[in-house]
Each structure stands twice: as C-alpha cells, then as structure tokens.
Amino acid sequence: MAFVLRAKKIVPVRVEISYRTCPAKTYEDEHGNRCLGRTVFDHCQIVGAVAKELVHRSPAKHLFPQGSALAASAHDIGKVSPTFYNKLYASCNLEILPSYVDANLEKNWGGHAGVSQLTAQSLQAPEYVPEILGQHHGFTPNVVGKRATDESFGGELWQSEREKLVQALKQALGEDWPQVENFATARLLAGLTSVADWIGSGQHFDNPQAEWQTKISKALDEAGFVQPTYKQNLSFKQIFGFLPRPAQSLLYEQITEPGVYVLEAPMGLGKTEAALYAAYQMLVNGNSSGIYFALPTQLTSNKIYDRFSQFLQQILATDCEHRSLLLHANAWLLETEMGEEGRPGGAWFNHSKRGLLAPFAVGTIDQALMAAMNVKHGFVRAFGLAGKVVILDEVHTYDAYTGTIMDALIRLLLQLDCTVIILSATLSQERRQDMIGVPTESMGYPLITAFAKTAKQATEITVPVSDTQSLTVQLQQDEKIAVEEALMRAEQGQQVLWIENTVREAQERYLQIASRADSLGLQCGLLHSRYTFDDRQIIENKWVDLFGKSGWQANQRQQCGRILIGTQVLEQSLDIDADFLISRFAPTDMLLQRVGRLWRHAETPRHPDARREVWLLAPKLDSAIKNPKMAFGVSAYVYNPYVLCRSLEVWQSIRQISLPDDIRCLIESTYRSRTETGNMSQWLHELNEGNRDRIGQSALQQLARVGLAQAGNTLPESKAQTRYSESDSFEVLLLRNIFYDSEQQAGVLTLLNNQRVILPLSRASLDRNQWRKLTATLMQQIVHVRPNEAPKQLSRERLQKFGLQHCFYLGNPLWGNDESLLRIALVNDADQLKGLENQQLHDKYVIEYRPDLGYRIVKE
C-alpha cells in the first residue's frame, strides 16, 4: 500500500509491487539512454556471491563469522521502498507510483541504507548487523525514532516484501545472519559489505539481461584480489644485498606471530629493512596477508616507494600476478577495476585510499588511523588492514590527540590478527608503554620490545651497540652568520643541508641563497611538499641522488659544493647524507631525525675539512621562556611552545652529543612530566588547556575519543582530523586554462605543460580505462595545501560543468557535510594563481606557482 496527498490528507493507494521487480540500479545503454538495471534481488545475490568469494580468497578468512555473505547481500534490502522505486523510475522517464513522499526527502533517513537498517532491526537480526547494513555507504544513517513499517517506507505492505527478500537471500546463499562477537569483527564485516557492493556494482554486472554467475571470479581478479605468491627461504642478504646488523636480526627473530613489536634505534641503522624482512617471514609462513607501510605524513619522500618496490621485486615469485600491478607507478590505480566507489570520481579511486585494499601498499599513518575512527568508510580501512603486517614508520613521542587514536588503532589491529611493527628513533618510555598496552620498564637503547598476541607480558631486549659517533652542536642566533657558513662550506665542496620548519621559510631561504650560490659556481636546491607530483618527482630524483649513495658512486657528489634547503620532508624516510647541517630549532624528536641525515654513511667521500657538525638556529633560553611566540616565530605555531622551550632547555648547554648513546636521555629529559613554575607553568597550562591559537591536549584527547566513538554522527574524511596541527589536506588542481566547449560537450583543460585534456560531460563517451588514464594524468597536477591557504571553493555544479565529477570525488549531496576537497587555480604567465574569471583567488594572499619554488604565498 502506498499513499497520495489530497487536500493535505494522506489517502492510501493500494499497489502490487513485488521485491522481485524492484530495481536496484540504472545504467546507460549503447545509445546513452538511461534504463532500469538489475533488480534488487539480483544485485543482492551478486554482492553476496562477491562477498563469499572475497572471504574464500582472504588469508584472514578465519576472522569472518559464518553468515558474513548474507549480511553483505542484505545491504540493499532498503531499496524495496516506494521512494527509491520512484527515484529510479523518474530518472528513466518512466511512470512513477503515486506517493505523498518526495524521493528527495530520502536524505532525512540516510536513503535506502537507513531503510535496510530499520528492516534488519525489525527482523531482530543479531547485534551489529543492522548497523552494518545501514553504514554500507560509509555513514551512519539518522534513523532515530523511525520504524521499518513507517508510511514513508511503504508501511506494512513494502515491509512484507523486504522480509520476503531476506528469506529469498538466505535460501539463495545457504546462510543465516552472522553472530558478530565484538566491535572489531563488526568493522571487518562492514568493510567486506562495502567492498563487495562496489565490486558487485561494476561493469560486469550492469546489463540486467546478461548472466552474472560466471563473472564473479573475473570481477575479483580485476579488482586485484588475487593472492600473491612468494619466493621461499630467502635470506636477508639475498633480499637487501648485505648481511643483517644485530638489531635487524634480533627484530625478525622475535616476530613469529601477530602482535605489537617496537624497534627503537638510531637513524641510519636500517630499521626499514629489519621490518620488511620480518614481514617477508610472516608472509611466507602464512601468518600475514600483506603489508601496509605507514609513513608519518604525505610530506614523506616518494623515494620510499622505490625502496618498497625493490623489496617486492625480490620477494614476489616470478609468476606472481601482482608483479605488474605493484612494481610500476600508478599501475594499481590504472589497471584494477573496483566498481562503483572505486571508479574515477568515486570516493575510493584515490590511490591513498585504494592502497589499503591492495596486498602491498605504502601510505600514510593518517589513512590507517581512520580505520579506528567513526569516519566515512573507516571500516573499509579496517577490512583492508586485517591480517596484514602494518609497519608504522618514523613514530615519535606523538601529541595526545594522535596518540589516543594510535593506541586505539593498535588495539583494533591486534583483534584483526595484524602484526604491528613500530619503528622509531625517538620514543619516550611512557609513550612506548602506552602503545604496547602492557607495562614496560627498560631504558636501554637501542631497544626491541615484543608483545606477541598470545603472550601475557612484553619482552624487552637491549641491542648491543657496535658503533658510536659524536657530533658537535652549535646554537646560533645570527642567521646571517649561518648563511655565510653554509656558503663557505659549500665553496669547499661540501654538501650542505638546511632545514626550515615551514614551506614559506624554506622558500624565502632558497631565494636568499640561490643567486649567491650560482655566482659562486655552487648548486642550490629546494624540496618541500607543495609541488605538483611531476615537479616534485624531478626535484627529488635529482637531489636525493646527489646527496645519496648514487651521487658519490657516480662521482657526482665530488664535482661541486651544494646547498639543499627544505622542510620536514628532509627528515623523513630519505637516505640522504649531508656533510654539514643547519636546522631551524624544533622539538628534540625532530632534531634527532634531522641529525640522522648528517654523516649517514661512513664510506661517503667528504672534503678533508668537513666536520660532523650541526648548527641550530635558536633563540636564547630566557627570551624563549619569556615570550616563545616572539622568540621562535612561526615555529611556535608549527610546534607547541612548551615543547619547544623544554627542548631548548635540553639543547642550550650541549656542545657535543654521542649517538646513539645520548638519544634516550635527550628524549626523556624533554618529555618527562614535571611540575612547572613561572612562565613555564603558563605554557604548560596552555599545552593542556589551549589558547586562542590552538586547542589544548585535554580537549584534543576528548575530540579523539569522540572520533573513536562507535555511535553518533559519522565524520566525513575532510573533517576527520588526525593531526595536532592543520594538515595539507586540500587538493589544488593547477591548470593553464579551463573552459566548456559546447560543440564537443566537454570540459577542455590545459595543463601546466600545455597538454590538453578533454573531459566529456557524458561518462558514456569514454570507457572506464580511458577515464582512469585521464584521472591519473590530472592527479599529477595536484598540489596539497593547508585549508587556510587554499583558493576559494567552487560550487559542485560549477565543477560538474567541466566534467570534473568523472575524475574527482566532489562530495555527496545526500550527506550535507561531505564536501569536496578539490580547488581549481589557473597559473598565468607571471606564475600567479587566478580564478576562472581571472579574479583574485584568496581574500588575504597573493599566490603563485613556480616549478622551482612550488606553491607559494607571496604576501598577505
């Protein structure tokens, strides 16, 4: 029975609609006409079959309860409802059912997903199952106070059809509802449901007239869900080309089962190789389903991808089907077909997310952290990580906000049979204990802490130190003296590294030094995060090679002196070796990371006058404690003033340090809790309680707990902050020109290299492979910037007029706060960024882009 509105009264109208005839999809035929696609029953069967095959192929299949495929198949039972029925019929210009409910009002209950959840609740499905059905589009629908038999959903008549559909699915799949024992399993099953739905909505299943049963296996193959095969019994030396050091051997000897393992060791000791070899052993022994290598931020060098790829080249069997996908840039993005959400323009096409579903991937810690958060598709991340070796690289004594989420992530990963390997040069004992989750007490360094899943307590192993090195430390207040020292050392032929705390400071320093360096016959470079991928790749390849092993092996290093200026990207995951280091002052963690780029390899050729020395650009301690924002400048907005003052207290009297002997003492002295007096008491209070410029740690911890809450509103990814400070989260697409061509009915985009890209407004004009290639091309033109430095937002409708919805995710109107992170800027001949009508892009800033300087805020 449905209803029609007459004279403001609801009058029932009886209709005879079977669940077997309710459509689930529409599709475009070969003539571009929109037609009704699969029925709900067929689509649900397809998704159930995909889910069953996903579980069968998963090395972590033991984690999925019996009945998982039924839960996945039932995700769309809510499409048997009059509003959804009318929406599809109207889109195909077919006659709709008389109903007083406007289909546009579906957003009030989360669309068909909300009806699925209510239906499962009315059927008394087991705990967690209704919510899993309701969340399959990533969000928790707002169905509070609603019932499956409400007139909005078709009343008893339509609910009866939904119940018949569930019974038909149980019979077709031979399964009943799963019994979900805990929250971790619920997230795993929710992720399975979403991924199965994406694949089951792919191109193989569009045509309702075509049979689907024989296409399940092919669809999973094309999505990349093929189990890798490995070369057996490889030694450490066979993979990496050298014998393992004691710390490396001790680590992989400890890792024989899922658990949490921490390796604290100095920079340059080979922590990455140690973790990867341990992961290889877990893979070949059948204890792991893949590897996710999580780096601190997207600032991190692209070079780590090369190292990871070389590792895979060594361990994958020669006939492994993943070799071509995993060993070539963008291949996973271009050659895998992930269905609806994973297509270009879908929320999960972006490689930073898609990588979580690949058997092997390098990504950010942020993407992993969201697996534990109530954030859109957070559970898909949990599904992607289940059973893998998860390597958390460059972990420091994190702020309370990220730390709270990271601790929750580690607990979740343990429940999902993951092997968590944490690599750090700079952990405090307290922070290590929080992550492990059991008492620890050793103050040794280097140190391995092992807590296997089946163990009752942690094992702590102090690693013998075979080599110690000392370096000279000088605090310098006069930056002019530092500039002259850098130039003088470079004139001798030394390779000088200069690290600033912000992109703007690094750009200004480069402009100050580059012209003088050129007149002296020296080379000067700049490296930070705000370049297009293409430009960054060119700069990184050049300078990492010059400052790395390949530079001196090819005799390039010795040809002239050089100065490389950059930001935090230079302290993370880069195998570069400087003769002399100048660094803006930063917290002790970061300073030690930067020092790790100084005299990194004993065999590197150096000028005879080179000394292992670091200059720290730092204020006097008294002035810093009195007014840290004035003394530290913009660094006090990047790092917390209290932590900077505590760090300066430690470093201000140091003239020489010994590595690794002094690392533990330096970290503990910086972060050990203590009672403060005077100005330091105020800065500690602001650290905990915040001020007008930043949120305090107490509030951040509470925000983290809200983000981790299992109930409540789901955060869109754009709002899910996992960092203490703002991250470079907005995507700016840089172009020379963009316009709509009415004759071609397409958007015409001119790239910075003057290449033209045509984006038809009709998706059917190009096949999926062509769209993937176009999207990959455009993604090379993206620069990531902070929200406050991004151009003004264009409306979703304006972006769609250029066909950009086929390449980039532009948000979903169904979820009011699910916004697009994409911004567009045109680069003119003067390198300035302008809007589409040549207008100013930003209310406060003039912005420019140059291949050598990157994305630059010129003035306020």
Image (tube, rainbow, N blue to C red):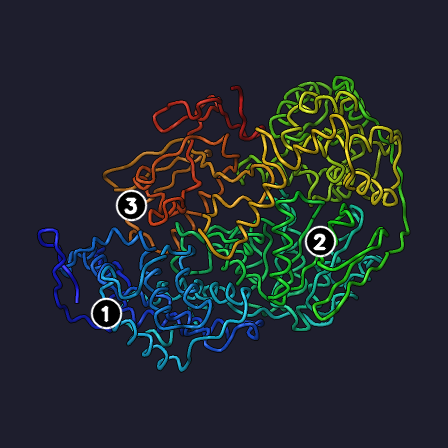
Please give the label number shown on residue 434: 2
Residue bearing the label numbered 3: 761
Q: Which one is earlier in the sequence, the residue at label 3 or at label 2?
A: 2
Residue 168 lies, in percent from the top left, at 31, 79
Residue 175 visible (yes or no)? yes
Please give the label number shown on residue 732: none
CA distance separating discs 1 and 3: 42 Å
Residue 30 visible (yes or no)? no
Residue 63 lies, in percent from the top left, at 56, 72
Q: Say which amino acid is labelled 3.
A: Leu
Q: Which one is earlier in the sequence, the residue at label 1 or at label 3?
A: 1
Q: Say which amino acid is labelled 1.
A: Glu
Quadrant that contains the N terminus: bottom left
- 473 in relation to 323, above or below: above
Report whether 103 appears left or right of 598: left
Residue bearing the label numbered 1: 156
Report whether 84 appears left or right of 777: left
Dot 1, crowdedness within 10 Å: few (<14), some or many (≥20)? some
Residue 709 lies, in percent from the top left, at 52, 54
Q: Relative to the observer, which residue lies in front, 482 or 430?
A: 430
Q: Secondary structure at mark 1?
A: helix
CA distance separating discs 2 and 1: 52 Å
Q: Secondary structure at mark 2?
A: helix
Look at 59% across and 41% down and name the residue there: 699
Q: Secondary structure at mark 3?
A: loop
- 169 in relation to 425, above or below: below
Dot 3, crowdedness within 10 Å: few (<14), some or many (≥20)? some
- 357 in relation to 123, above or below: above
Look at 67% across and 24% down and name the residue there: 629
